[in-house]
Image (cartoon, coloured by chain):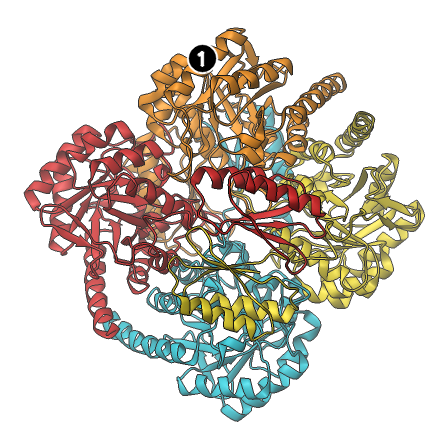
Chain colours: A cyan, B yellow, C orange, D red
Amino acid sequence: MIIVMQFGAPTEAVDAVCRVIRSRGIDPLVMPGEDRLAIGIPASLSIEDREFLESVVGSMPEVSKVTQTSSPYKLASIEFHRDRTVVEAGPNKIQIGDGGFTVMAGPCSVESYEQFKSAAAIVKGSGAQVLRGGAFKPRTSPYSFQGLQLEGLKIIKQVGEETGLATISEVMSADMVDTVGQHVDILQIGARSMQNFPLLIEAGKSQLPVFLKRGPSATIDEFLLAAEYVLSQGNPRVILCERGVMPLDKTYTRNTLDLSAVPVLKAHTHLPVIVDPSHGTGVARYVAPMALAALVCGADGVMVEMHPDPMSALSDGSQALTPDKYSELTNRLAGLSRYMSETQA
Amino acid sequence: MIIVMQFGAPTEAVDAVCRVIRSRGIDPLVMPGEDRLAIGIPASLSIEDREFLESVVGSMPEVSKVTQTSSPYKLASIEFHRDRTVVEAGPNKIQIGDGGFTVMAGPCSVESYEQFKSAAAIVKGSGAQVLRGGAFKPRTSPYSFQGLQLEGLKIIKQVGEETGLATISEVMSADMVDTVGQHVDILQIGARSMQNFPLLIEAGKSQLPVFLKRGPSATIDEFLLAAEYVLSQGNPRVILCERGVMPLDKTYTRNTLDLSAVPVLKAHTHLPVIVDPSHGTGVARYVAPMALAALVCGADGVMVEMHPDPMSALSDGSQALTPDKYSELTNRLAGLSRYMSETQA
Amino acid sequence: MIIVMQFGAPTEAVDAVCRVIRSRGIDPLVMPGEDRLAIGIPASLSIEDREFLESVVGSMPEVSKVTQTSSPYKLASIEFHRDRTVVEAGPNKIQIGDGGFTVMAGPCSVESYEQFKSAAAIVKGSGAQVLRGGAFKPRTSPYSFQGLQLEGLKIIKQVGEETGLATISEVMSADMVDTVGQHVDILQIGARSMQNFPLLIEAGKSQLPVFLKRGPSATIDEFLLAAEYVLSQGNPRVILCERGVMPLDKTYTRNTLDLSAVPVLKAHTHLPVIVDPSHGTGVARYVAPMALAALVCGADGVMVEMHPDPMSALSDGSQALTPDKYSELTNRLAGLSRYMSETQA
Amino acid sequence: MIIVMQFGAPTEAVDAVCRVIRSRGIDPLVMPGEDRLAIGIPASLSIEDREFLESVVGSMPEVSKVTQTSSPYKLASIEFHRDRTVVEAGPNKIQIGDGGFTVMAGPCSVESYEQFKSAAAIVKGSGAQVLRGGAFKPRTSPYSFQGLQLEGLKIIKQVGEETGLATISEVMSADMVDTVGQHVDILQIGARSMQNFPLLIEAGKSQLPVFLKRGPSATIDEFLLAAEYVLSQGNPRVILCERGVMPLDKTYTRNTLDLSAVPVLKAHTHLPVIVDPSHGTGVARYVAPMALAALVCGADGVMVEMHPDPMSALSDGSQALTPDKYSELTNRLAGLSRYMSETQA
């Protein structure tokens, strides 16, 4: 921790800060600087000491700012854990983050056994490895379709078993982690739940793979601290998902897909990173270009919405791909993935 | 709903849109326009029809945009409910939103009976009506103090009974609504939980007053739709709280307090509106000016953090007022409130 | 400047950073820290040294981050200039920032001598001190009304002389500073020109009072650095104006008026601060509550749009006050200003 | 234009709106709707009529909202101009937007003839077609290096002639368009100047190719309206550049590169689109992945910063590529571009 004093701060103000630091048994290091004096804390701090000093010193007279030098996240950080994490999931033990490119696909909502089975067949035929489908749907309006709920979970489980695909579905609250976990292979935590801390803790305890979506206004640090909640429960199987942040306006896209988050995350965490261009743009025609872009900038995979009949989708129809467009995309992704790994070497 | 076609859209494209609309049993109204033709839907639509048309028509060829003309929220809207809501709460049946100015105050976290009792005494002495204190604390980092939890709730209940003050504390998940509801008079739903839909539904079912904080990137419509979740459970006792939105940067404040949300909300909803300048700015010295500003632009009250000894606060110390500053503020608020009501007439 | 190394950075990496620092003739101070080592630069740095070190060291291996400890702005900073600036302007030598509350009012655009004269009469009658009116209008679309330009300036000059009011109008480019400066008392630099550096420099050279509007996505530091451009030309007469920042969405307001910028600016700069609630909200009905709020949170004045006949305004009609609403507002501001100064003591 | 009334708006309010519309000689079309009545204007409107109605009707009682149905931009719109624009530039008549992939590269600032010549040799050797270099530098702080100015322009012209490369440099004000235009082949308008309207108009008049960077908080509509300013001067040679928008925070990147703007722009305008990943991220290590991503999502080219000796760069050193990294990137771009065009068919 570094405390920067205001320009011309009198000796008494500097001394007062030093006294507070010493009151925690720590020796401050006073460092005359350019126009402002800085006080360093050259020691390992406990969480309590750090929070105490940050809040108390930060509001003392003549203090200009308090800067943290320690990493806010540890378990998620590549500084402290130099090997990349590979998350294994599902009956076929697929490997997410092993250098291959994982496609997760399926309809936004599970609407019926027939619809989901038909979607699964297309997904499997395209070579995708993970089947997605919403049973519990977080909807902005209470009047929108909320999903088939438990019935939807049962359909997912059945179709997963019939096809051998790994399955993923969203869990919206801590008390549903067990139930959802009994029906799917990967727990999805949605963007609006990224800081639902009781849910993160339960998902951590479940020891199931957790697919964590970035909140629409979450900074990279907040995102990794949310992952840290899961990791801190002893569950290392966390997959990160960039799905778009608050847009400047919503005239043309629902969100701003932050693709630069992919190389940024790759540089700071060992966890696999997936991109969701369907929610990230909210418009079917932009899904393919952004999925391809995600691949070349280093993502470990994409999650895309595909609906066997988008014209009749009960939610988010306008962002789902038709089976034809979906197949075209997966073909292009496979070819591009090969091209990239051949030329990487 | 209005569908705007692209410039020069051929007749076939217009006809195709009209056919889809007629397939739902609705007669479209074609309206030649400036450079683009529009198609109106002059009828009451069911939710299903509206969502179907929005997503299907929105992705048809030559369609430029689809605009909603109906209000997304109904129960929260002042258009549909012209009388302002007054929320009654606590043992003394205080009235929030009745034209008076409600002060809610207390420490960020309940730390001990002594600390909370001492805070309550100051709060009561200042004439405030609601005592706040966190028992379950949503913290960005898993390593930060998470609150005294159930023990904290018990302290709140005891101190509330001893002082006669109405109490408020945060509930973070649906399965805790009952427990928290048995200990406090008002359920607080935090900014990061604004779109925790299972929680909103349970809070709605509880029939307790619900204090709903705006999410840091929530638009006004999203905020009012979150309130609609609670209202749609038959619970009309919703209090809205503006607490700051995503800042351009965090160098000087933790959030950008959106005070214009106060008159905007007052113009579009009948629910009471409270402002939280403590979290809204994150800095103790800015709390008083923003609290006064909230009052004159029409808020029904403020929630402020006060700590009997901010130097030792376990969380958010740098934004808590000292007892002295707090008393000075409540005096100024009382005087200004009188001045405003005298000059309003 | 403080350089923070990554966790576990090897000695060679630390040494390499130290060598670069020493290559500029500066002695680094190595400071073991919590989990990361920090390197301080306990010396006054020239601009060149600072920029060199920031960019070079920032991209060296195993460096986690580089933090500035010096203030980016000096002339604008209250740390370096403890007396508040009062800007004198116009024929009547009005004093902006002297503790009084300055009202600047007038139509968005000058449309004709008659319209502007009529507006001026109302403005003067209300006790306002500064008459505003646009001659050169920055408009998002090239097809919108661009102002009467030079003819508009002449009208402003004439009406200013006839009424004795100080006048203000926008200058949009460096080469127009002279021309505009010959016709008005205060040069306005619009939000979209906040970082038009040639314009800032010319405005600085003019020695005229400069009214600088905050850009819609400008941070406080960027805003004060824009002021620093003017000040660095030896022109101390800068007035800052908060006029709203990028909103989360534009459904209800055109911008988000950042009122907390008022106390933040007051804490960090000695320059006067004016609030523009007309552009800040973009909606006439929200202007009065936000103007009153600006006053109580410490602004030195407001700029409001008033049109003698808003129904016929050629630009921004929907945010202009009618003469009646305007008079009501100035009365309330005058009363509130008296109340605040009486109770401050 | 569509006017939506509030729920339950009385007949008199509807009539009043219709009267205002008829006062402009236009017949309104009243359309009963779901819960709110809408009034359409089925006619071509002049700009004056549209602005008048928008502002006047928008503030009438019981009006809920006014929606535009016409496109705000015409000359830039692909709806009105279905052929894609190819911009020819420089001595070798390079074609930007013809389906190939254009690389523009060079140092942030021209520092000396030697430095720029050396950069040009590398750029030419890599097969890039456009040489960039700043002579007039927009810098946030008045104390930062402002560029070599006229001397820099002369160096650019000389090196351009010696190498045969097309050249590009920024022009910061309207009165400098002539001077800069005499020294370079393409005028660059920087992000902070995107709404410098006098500059846009002069750049339009110059008939030179104009490289227009998106402002950091500019919406797509604002960006295309800025292009419209240039186009409306009879200059069709506009190249758009996405260079990152306001980030959620600046901890890891300077901006958020909005790559989805590429397919969005391609769907709405016929103008070529270039991506600048150097400013878009602000960090050298993220430039390559984002440049590759730009290519696959449909950009017509990239602009990247390369410095022959980044360790000694006078500005923005930390985002410039070394010659080695630059060559590696151009090789990968060339290969990927070939792969994409082979597999497109």
Residue D297: % across, % down: 33, 63
Residue nearest the observer in this picture, A276 or D106: A276
Three-letter residue code for mark 1: Lys
Residue nearest the observer in this picture, D53 or D232: D53
Residue B64: % across, % down: 44, 59
Q: Quadrant of residue D184?
A: top left
Left or right: B337 in relation to D324: right
Left or right: C266 in relation to D12: left
Residue at 14% in and 50% down: D122
Rendered position, D17 above or below A78? above
Rendered position, B221 above or below A338? above
Residue B44: % across, % down: 66, 64
Name the residue tied to disc 1.
C157
Q: Is residue A32 visible?
A: no
Residue C135: % across, % down: 43, 23
Rendered position, C190 above or below A205? above
| Chain letter for mark 1 | C
Q: Quadrant of residue D115?
A: top left
Question: The residue tagged with tag 1: helix, strand or loop?
Answer: helix
Residue nearest the observer in this picture, D279 or C44: D279
Left or right: C178 in relation to B179: left
Q: Is residue D76 visible?
A: yes
Q: Residue furthest left?
A: D162
Q: Residue furthest bottom?
A: A162
Image quadrant for the N terminus of chain C?
top left
Image quadrant for the C terminus of chain C?
top right
